[in-house]
Image: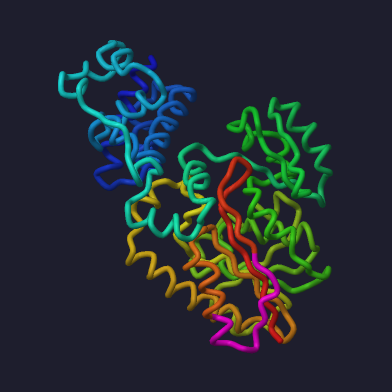
Amino acid sequence: MTPAARYAAAIAVLDDVLAGASAEKCLTTWARGNRYAGSKDRAAVRDHVFDVLRRKRSLGALGGGETGRTLIIGLLRHQGIDPDMIFGAGGYGPEALSDAELAGGRAPVGHEVYDMPAWLWQIWSADLGADATAAAQALQDRGPITLRVNLRRATRDAVQAILAEDGIICHPSPDVKTALHVVENERKVQISRAYVEGLIEVQDLASQAAVAGLELAAGSRVLDYCAGGGGKSLALVDLFDCEVCAHDISAARMGDIPTRSARAGVVVAVCKTADLARVDPFDAVFVDAPCSGSGTWRRAPEAKWALTQRKLQEYNYLQIEVITKAAGFVRAGGQLIYATCSVLSCENRAIIEAFVTAHPDWLLLSDDQRFPDATGDGFYHSVLQKT
């Protein structure tokens, strides 16, 4: 495909996304309907689509509207590319620009600059203070790809060398002993020898840091209450040699845990909700609560535009419900770890303060809020102890 044809394809996909379909589904449908498109073509179209979704508000201003076509015009202007080089260039590219499109567009202002709805920017800037601008700007670009090394299987240096043999270049994180930042050939990771042999998992730095910073004795019984795909369950077993039970209200989300744990050479038990009533209290319960995902919006930008004030409030109600239920599975003297991939205080510190106020037998030991930056996503976690 020519560069112009790739942009034309991105326009078509974006129009479907703007009509309400998910970006992933639209990209899959487009790829199936265009078998001639090679892997580089598919990657380029995907990048164009997600580049637009991350910056939809500012690109809409630059392009003069929020259709697939005007958003791509805005993207080209943002990237310093003359749209006339793409529109009307032939090669199955988009049609030439009209006089109105040539004259349209303006510089983004206010909340548009940071690619957020006006109501959200007010909350964001109040919560993040001096960090608000930098964190919002971090979400406008692609996030870094970080790997967690399975230390039970190999050292970080050894894994770095094995990845290099497959052309995947990584730099070790100075802050987290399990982390490698991918700087070249990130799309090869899941077909690499290191991945296939269970030496690595893809896991963001902030998430790795939250697990690595815990203090758990070997052999501890740990419940991963909102386990999802099991990334933190695998990390807990690897780092602390503990007995982990993975649970999620949606059993389907845990479908890959047996395969992932087998590949890593560890054991993670999968517990359905009905099973929890028959287990003894745990030494620690990790609660990665449902949230807005505001710290990870560069990876799932549609979630940012879909969030409403009412939906955020619904998350808050759910977070209080989830942490309260999870606390009931912690033994006396045990730990409750509450986490979200959000940077909004109403989902984080406010939830902890409300919980501790309502449950005076719980003590807050520590909490940490990370904002998205060049090294990792936004992430919050706190450690509480049942006194």
Q: Magenta stretch: give its range.
A: 355-367
Q: Is residue 143 above or below residue 339?
A: above
In the visual, does 67 lie left or right of 199? left
Along the line of sight, which residue is nearer the eye, 255 or 385? Answer: 385
Q: Is residue 120 left or right of residue 245?
A: left
Work out which quarter of the rendered image holds the C terminus and state it.
bottom right
Asked if residue 368 is positioned above or below residue 166 in the image, the reply reads below
Can you give x and y, in whole percent of width and height, for residue 283 in the image?
73, 77
Residue at position x 69%, y 25% in the image: 167
Give 307 or 356, whichever is nearer the viewer: 356
Q: Residue 150 or 277: which is nearer the viewer? A: 150
- Toward which corner of the image does residue 29 lie, by quadrant? top left
The answer to whether residue 67 is magenta is: no
Residue at the far left: name it: 99
Q: Quadrant of the N terminus?
A: top left
Q: Which quadrant holds residue 288? A: bottom right
Along the horizontal axis of the image, is 232 left or right of 156?
left
Q: Is residue 72 visible?
A: yes
